[in-house]
Amino acid sequence: MMPVIECRRFVDTQVEIDNQQRPR
């Protein structure tokens, strides 16, 4: 079992949170 998709989704969520916290 290689949770690559889950890992990518997790990173995407982290990036979204970071963008919301630090809007350009």
Image: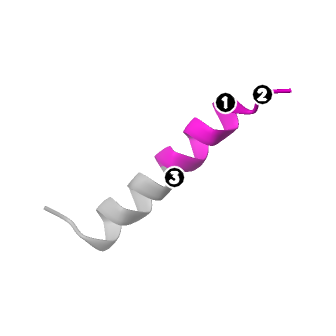
Q: Residue shown at 43%/63% (left/top)?
A: 17
Q: Residue shown at 63%/40% (left/top)?
A: 7
The residue beneath circle 3 is 13
Dot 1 lies on which element? helix
Give residue 4's position: percent from left, percent from top: 66, 30
The residue beneath circle 2 is 2
Mark 1–mark 3 Cα distance, whole angstroms, equals 14 Å
Q: Residues within 10 Å of mark 2 (few under 14, many from 20)?
A: few
Given the image, on which type of amino acid does mark 2 rest? Answer: Met
Q: Residues within 10 Å of mark 1 (few under 14, many from 20)?
A: few
Given the image, on which type of amino acid does mark 3 rest? Answer: Thr
What residue range appears in magenta? 1-12
Give residue 19's position: percent from left, percent from top: 30, 60
Given the image, on which type of amino acid does mark 1 rest? Answer: Val
Mark 1–mark 2 Cα distance, whole angstroms, equals 6 Å
Mark 3–mark 2 Cα distance, whole angstroms, equals 19 Å
Label 3 vs 2, first from the N-terminus: 2
Q: How is the image coloured?
A: one colour
Q: Residue shown at 36%/64% (left/top)?
A: 18
Q: Residues within 10 Å of mark 3 (few under 14, many from 20)?
A: few
Dot 2 lies on which element? loop
- Is residue 5 part of the magenta span, yes or no? yes
Label 1 vs 3, first from the N-terminus: 1
The residue beneath circle 1 is 4
Q: Of helix, strand and loop, which mostly describes the magenta segment? A: helix
Give residue 5's position: percent from left, percent from top: 65, 30
Q: Is residue 20 left or right of residue 17?
A: left
Quadrant location, the N terminus = top right
Dot 3 lies on which element? helix
The answer to whether the residues at label 1 and label 2 have Cβ atoms under 8 Å apart is: yes
